[in-house]
Amino acid sequence: MLRGGTIGLLAGALLCGCQQNSKWNGSMDELLLSQPERFATVLQDPGKYRVQIIYTQIDRYADNRPAFTSYTYGLNPDQYFYPASTVKLPTALLALEKINKLAIPGLTRDTAMLTDVASDWQTAALTDPSSPTGLPSVGHYVRKILLVSDNDAFNRLYEFIGQQSLNESLHAKGYRNTRIFHRLEVARSAEENAKTNPVRFVDGDTVLYAQAAQSSEVNYAHDEPILLGRAEIVDGERLDRAKDFSGNNVFPLQDLHDVMQALIFPQYVDEQRRFKLTEDDYQFVYRNMSAYPGESGIAEYADAEQYPDGYVKFFMYGGSAATIPDNIRIFNKPGDAYGFLTDCAYIVDFERGVEFLLAATIFTNDNETFNDDTYEYAEVGLPFMRDLGLAIYEIERARKREHAPDLGRFRKATLPW
């Protein structure tokens, strides 16, 4: 079930200091309006911040089957936001799915994956010092993506899957508005992003699988310009023009939410939408999605100042909380770039039997200039995400449930390493 909320709010009510009823009444608009101490800044100019939200309540039948009811705010598939690192989630899932589909004896997600080069602009990946074996693998790349949102790990999985295969697979699953067609952090032309490196999976000196370089035959760029802002910095020079995002990845909030729902509740979504993962794969993904960097056993992530518990937990903890209570776990994938902040999460409180899905995006680029590294993440974006997560969590704590959820499947994934 989907219940929509309108984006037009009466900002004057916030400015007059009127007391609002903060009790949940089924309206996302009213929820935000009722808490000016949290949301006044954003609601004074909702168009500027381009906020979109999907909040999904989960109720359980007596046999623990879930029922979903979604509430939205500002949801608009035609309102572009740059998805940044959120595209890493479906890419990671498709990489695990591809390993399973290859069905080659001895080839697993932990098999060494060596990335070679077919062009002078490509880069190889033959070692990984952060890996227990010193060698890269699909599994270790997935861990790095989920634990700290590593960009190179995404690029390597993008190269393993291939641009065209990645998009065709997502579209076949029903995520038809999504287009993932460029690497992250490294500058590549459209033609270069269409080409991916040769890859080998090896066991010692034995090559278990070799994949030649691939080249996409489809242009995934948007047909029309997607113009945002009023200036951008290119090669150190300010250009007073809108930035065109038509050549950038597209991952609408509804698709992001639905990918998360399919990951967390695979047996309760249409079979078409599911990823072909084993139960061991699911547990592997849940464990690394919900884990904190310091729990990973990866030495590079042991610095608690650089990687606090809340490092990639935008909802409730603002991306920086030093510690998170033991009863709370957040299974999520966030992203931030160009002033866009996005997160999608399945949040549970094991102690109180609370569970819900939440996805949101906000744009914080007050000077409307891209690539100047002047974005209001700390001042506006992260506080908004933190407070939105807290507001929904408070609703969920107070909400009556006929049947308490059995969260054992997810609890298992968060037990000590």
Image (cartoon, rainbow, N blue to C red):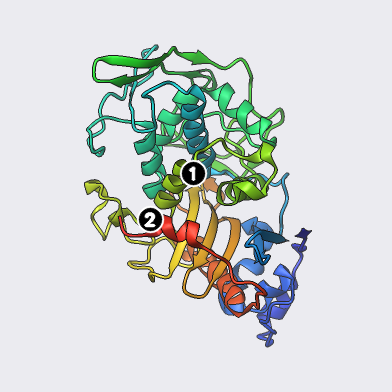
Q: Observer-nearest residue: 352 or 242?
A: 352
- Residue named by callout 2: 291
User: Does residue 310 lie above or below 163 as drawn?
Assistant: below
- In what element is the residue under mark 2? loop
At horizontal 60% and vertical 51% (from top left) the residue drawn is 265
**Residue 26 shows in this picture:** yes
Q: Observer-nearest residue: 332 or 185?
A: 332
At horizontal 39% and vertical 32% (from top left) the residue drawn is 109
Give the label on residue 322, or none: none
At horizontal 74% and vertical 62% (from top left) the residue drawn is 7
- Residue named by callout 1: 279
The location of residue 310, given as percent across then percent down, is 39, 61
Q: Nearer the viewer, mark 1 or mark 2?
A: 1
Q: Observer-nearest residue: 60 or 321?
A: 60
Q: Observer-nearest residue: 10 or 294?
A: 294
Three-letter amino acid code of the residue under disc 1: Glu
The location of residue 117, given as percent across then percent down, is 36, 15
